[in-house]
Image (cartoon, rainbow, N blue to C red):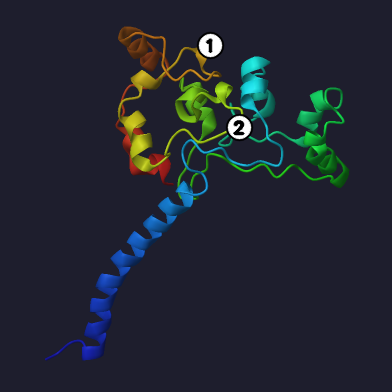
């Protein structure tokens, strides 16, 4: 006796083909979206052409001054208009380049900064835990203190993240390097192992569990 009607069998076959194709299309669409216009090495246009090279590199402003929540939150935070005005109410206050900043103040709205590094909603990432585990800004963001306009250094795809999670030791930095653009740790292999123990990174098994990044 036939359990399913011919129409039901056809629908099952189409579903078997369609679901994988839809999943593949979703992955392709995501990868396409994250590569354009935020291609690696391509500067992202901002409401004001902010220069990390000038502010962080030349003037030595600490990352935490503008990204105030980076130590204690999932997000690093974007600078508010008032944060910019702490300096620019006195410096270059009438510069045409800073007109969007003055307009932002008058309108009572934050500047519409565009994220250079972004992750899909299904990925859990916490800046605070990475900072406290010895991962420097430069590990993910590259030579940020050399960027006149900010660009994306890394793919941020799953394999890139897992590469670090499987072998974190080469990516760990001493405390005085964490808030820097250092991409190569100054620690030797023995010091890295000691730092891992000090930071409580006894095993990488938990770091590669699906639930670590997908919650």
Residue 176: assigned label: 1
Residue 175 lies, in percent from the top left, at 51, 13
Residue 149: assigned label: 2
Seen in the picture, residue 102 relative to 170 is either above or below; the reply is: below
Name which residue lies at 69% across and 23% down.
65
Name which residue lies at 50% across and 29% down.
141
- Left or right, 184 with reference to 116: left
Where is residue 6, by image quadrant?
A: bottom left
User: Circle 2: is it few (<14), some (14-19), or many (20+) Cα within 10 Å?
Assistant: some
Name which residue lies at 86% across and 23% down.
90
Seen in the picture, residue 178 relative to 157 is either above or below; the reply is: above
Of pointers 2 and 1, the one earlier in the residue sequence = 2
Where is residue 95, by image quadrant?
A: top right
Where is residue 18, by image quadrant?
A: bottom left
Residue 94: assigned label: none
Query: In front here: 146 or 87?
Result: 146
Residue 134 lies, in percent from the top left, at 46, 19
Look at discs 2 and 1 and give the one toward the viewer. 2
Residue 202 lies, in percent from the top left, at 33, 21
**Which quarter of the rendered picture does the N terminus lie within?**
bottom left
Residue 117 lies, in percent from the top left, at 53, 39
- Left or right, 29 with reference to 49: left
- Mark 2: which secondary structure? loop
- Mark 1: which secondary structure? helix
- Left or right, 3 with reference to 187: left
Query: In front here: 143 or 67?
Result: 143
């Amino acid at each position: 006796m036939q359990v399913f009607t011919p129409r039901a069998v056809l629908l099952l076959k189409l579903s078997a083909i369609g679901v994988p194709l839809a999943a593949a299309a979703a992955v392709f669409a995501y990868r396409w979206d994250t590569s354009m216009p935020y291609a690696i090495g391509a500067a992202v246009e901002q409401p004001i052409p902010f220069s990390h090279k000038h502010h962080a590199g030349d003037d030595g402003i600490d990352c935490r001054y503008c990204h105030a929540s980076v130590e204690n939150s999932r997000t690093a935070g974007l600078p508010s208009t008032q944060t910019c005005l702490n300096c620019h109410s006195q410096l270059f206050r009438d510069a045409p380049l800073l007109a969007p900043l003055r307009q932002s103040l008058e309108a009572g709205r934050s500047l519409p900064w565009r994220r250079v590094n972004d992750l899909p909603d299904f990925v859990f990432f916490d800046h605070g835990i990475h900072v406290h585990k010895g991962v420097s800004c430069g590990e993910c963001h590259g030579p940020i203190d050399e960027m006149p306009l900010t660009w994306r250094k890394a793919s941020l795809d799953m394999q890139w993240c897992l590469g670090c999670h499987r072998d974190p030791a080469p990516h760990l930095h001493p405390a005085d390097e964490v808030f820097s653009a250092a991409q190569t740790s100054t620690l030797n292999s023995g010091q890295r192992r000691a730092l891992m123990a000090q930071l409580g990174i006894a095993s990488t098994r938990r770091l590669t569990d699906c639930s670590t990044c997908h919650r």
